[in-house]
Amino acid sequence: MTTSTEDQSRIGQAANEHAEAARRYVQQLRVFYVHAAVFAGVEIHPQRVTKLFDEVLKRTGASKIRLHDLRHTMASLAIEAGVHPKVVQEQLGHSAIVVTLDNHSHVPQAVRRDSADKIAGFFCE
Protein backbone atom coordinates (compact mmCIF):
# COMPACT_ATOMS: atom_id res chain seq x y z
CA MET A 1 0.00 0.00 0.00
CA THR A 2 1.45 3.34 -1.03
CA THR A 3 0.62 6.44 0.97
CA SER A 4 1.24 10.01 -0.09
CA THR A 5 3.63 12.29 1.75
CA GLU A 6 0.60 14.28 2.91
CA ASP A 7 -0.99 11.11 4.36
CA GLN A 8 2.26 10.18 6.10
CA SER A 9 2.57 13.68 7.51
CA ARG A 10 -1.02 13.56 8.80
CA ILE A 11 -0.44 10.13 10.35
CA GLY A 12 2.77 11.34 11.98
CA GLN A 13 1.04 14.43 13.32
CA ALA A 14 -1.80 12.32 14.75
CA ALA A 15 0.72 9.96 16.40
CA ASN A 16 2.55 12.92 17.94
CA GLU A 17 -0.73 14.39 19.14
CA HIS A 18 -1.72 11.07 20.73
CA ALA A 19 1.69 10.73 22.37
CA GLU A 20 1.38 14.24 23.80
CA ALA A 21 -2.15 13.45 25.01
CA ALA A 22 -0.75 10.31 26.66
CA ARG A 23 1.92 12.34 28.45
CA ARG A 24 -0.66 14.87 29.65
CA TYR A 25 -2.97 12.07 30.70
CA VAL A 26 -0.26 10.36 32.73
CA GLN A 27 0.39 13.62 34.57
CA GLN A 28 -3.31 13.98 35.31
CA LEU A 29 -3.55 10.30 36.20
CA ARG A 30 -1.00 10.83 38.98
CA VAL A 31 -3.44 13.31 40.52
CA PHE A 32 -6.29 10.83 39.99
CA TYR A 33 -4.34 8.09 41.79
CA VAL A 34 -3.74 10.38 44.74
CA HIS A 35 -7.47 11.10 44.95
CA ALA A 36 -8.31 7.41 44.45
CA ALA A 37 -5.89 6.46 47.23
CA VAL A 38 -7.90 8.61 49.63
CA PHE A 39 -10.91 6.43 48.82
CA ALA A 40 -8.97 3.16 48.92
CA GLY A 41 -11.25 0.17 48.84
CA VAL A 42 -14.02 1.99 46.99
CA GLU A 43 -14.81 0.52 43.60
CA ILE A 44 -14.50 2.89 40.66
CA HIS A 45 -16.65 2.00 37.68
CA PRO A 46 -14.64 1.77 34.41
CA GLN A 47 -17.02 4.25 32.81
CA ARG A 48 -16.00 6.80 35.44
CA VAL A 49 -12.35 6.39 34.44
CA THR A 50 -13.34 6.97 30.81
CA LYS A 51 -15.27 10.10 31.79
CA LEU A 52 -12.26 11.40 33.74
CA PHE A 53 -10.04 10.72 30.74
CA ASP A 54 -12.43 12.64 28.47
CA GLU A 55 -12.38 15.55 30.95
CA VAL A 56 -8.57 15.57 30.91
CA LEU A 57 -8.54 15.67 27.09
CA LYS A 58 -10.98 18.56 27.12
CA ARG A 59 -9.01 20.50 29.77
CA THR A 60 -5.70 20.02 27.97
CA GLY A 61 -7.09 20.82 24.53
CA ALA A 62 -6.01 17.48 23.08
CA SER A 63 -8.02 15.90 20.30
CA LYS A 64 -10.69 13.37 21.30
CA ILE A 65 -9.35 9.81 21.39
CA ARG A 66 -10.53 6.66 23.10
CA LEU A 67 -8.84 5.72 26.36
CA HIS A 68 -8.00 2.35 24.78
CA ASP A 69 -6.04 4.20 22.07
CA LEU A 70 -3.44 5.07 24.72
CA ARG A 71 -2.77 1.37 25.21
CA HIS A 72 -2.03 0.99 21.50
CA THR A 73 0.04 4.19 21.43
CA MET A 74 2.09 3.10 24.45
CA ALA A 75 2.78 -0.33 22.98
CA SER A 76 3.68 1.03 19.54
CA LEU A 77 5.97 3.74 20.95
CA ALA A 78 7.62 1.25 23.33
CA ILE A 79 8.43 -1.16 20.50
CA GLU A 80 9.67 1.67 18.26
CA ALA A 81 11.84 2.95 21.15
CA GLY A 82 13.52 -0.45 21.38
CA VAL A 83 11.68 -2.02 24.30
CA HIS A 84 11.82 -5.78 23.75
CA PRO A 85 8.48 -7.02 22.34
CA LYS A 86 8.34 -9.74 25.01
CA VAL A 87 8.27 -7.04 27.70
CA VAL A 88 5.49 -5.19 25.88
CA GLN A 89 3.59 -8.48 25.46
CA GLU A 90 3.72 -9.08 29.21
CA GLN A 91 2.68 -5.49 30.01
CA LEU A 92 -0.34 -5.83 27.73
CA GLY A 93 -1.21 -9.32 28.92
CA HIS A 94 -1.21 -10.84 25.44
CA SER A 95 -1.10 -14.63 25.35
CA ALA A 96 1.35 -14.73 22.43
CA ILE A 97 4.03 -12.37 21.19
CA VAL A 98 2.63 -12.60 17.67
CA VAL A 99 -0.48 -10.73 18.86
CA THR A 100 1.69 -7.91 20.20
CA LEU A 101 3.83 -7.71 17.08
CA ASP A 102 0.88 -7.92 14.67
CA ASN A 103 -1.06 -5.18 16.46
CA HIS A 104 1.63 -2.82 17.69
CA SER A 105 4.77 -2.99 15.56
CA HIS A 106 4.96 -0.70 12.57
CA VAL A 107 7.79 -0.18 10.14
CA PRO A 108 9.15 3.35 10.61
CA GLN A 109 9.42 5.55 7.51
CA ALA A 110 13.23 5.68 7.75
CA VAL A 111 13.43 1.87 7.66
CA ARG A 112 11.10 1.79 4.64
CA ARG A 113 13.30 4.29 2.80
CA ASP A 114 16.45 2.38 3.69
CA SER A 115 14.88 -0.85 2.44
CA ALA A 116 13.80 0.79 -0.83
CA ASP A 117 17.29 2.25 -1.32
CA LYS A 118 18.92 -1.15 -0.77
CA ILE A 119 16.59 -2.86 -3.23
CA ALA A 120 17.07 -0.04 -5.77
CA GLY A 121 20.83 -0.57 -5.38
CA PHE A 122 20.51 -4.03 -6.94
CA PHE A 123 18.94 -2.58 -10.06
CA CYS A 124 21.17 0.48 -10.38
CA GLU A 125 24.54 -1.26 -10.24
Image: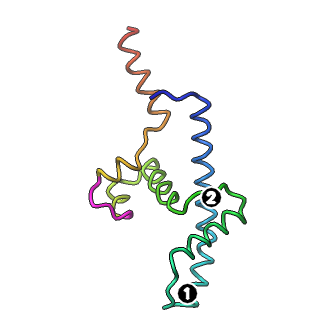
Judge left or right: residue 85 versus residue 19: left
- Residue 10, position in %: x, y? 62, 38
Name the residue nearer the viewer: 45 or 86.
45
Q: Which residues are magenta?
A: 91-97
Which residue has dot 1 on it?
37
94 relative to 10, above or below: below
Number of labels in the image equals 2
Kind of residue at disc 1: Ala
- Residue drawn where x is 40% and y is 9% of the image: 124
Image quadrant occupied by the C terminus: top left
> Which mark identifies residue 21?
2
Tell me the residue at 58%/41% (across/down): 12
What secondary structure is marked by label 2? Answer: helix
Relative side of 65 to 58, left or right: left
Residue 83 image point, x, y percent: 40, 54
Within 10 Å of the Cα at label 1, are there few (<14), some (14-19), or many (20+) other Cα atoms? few
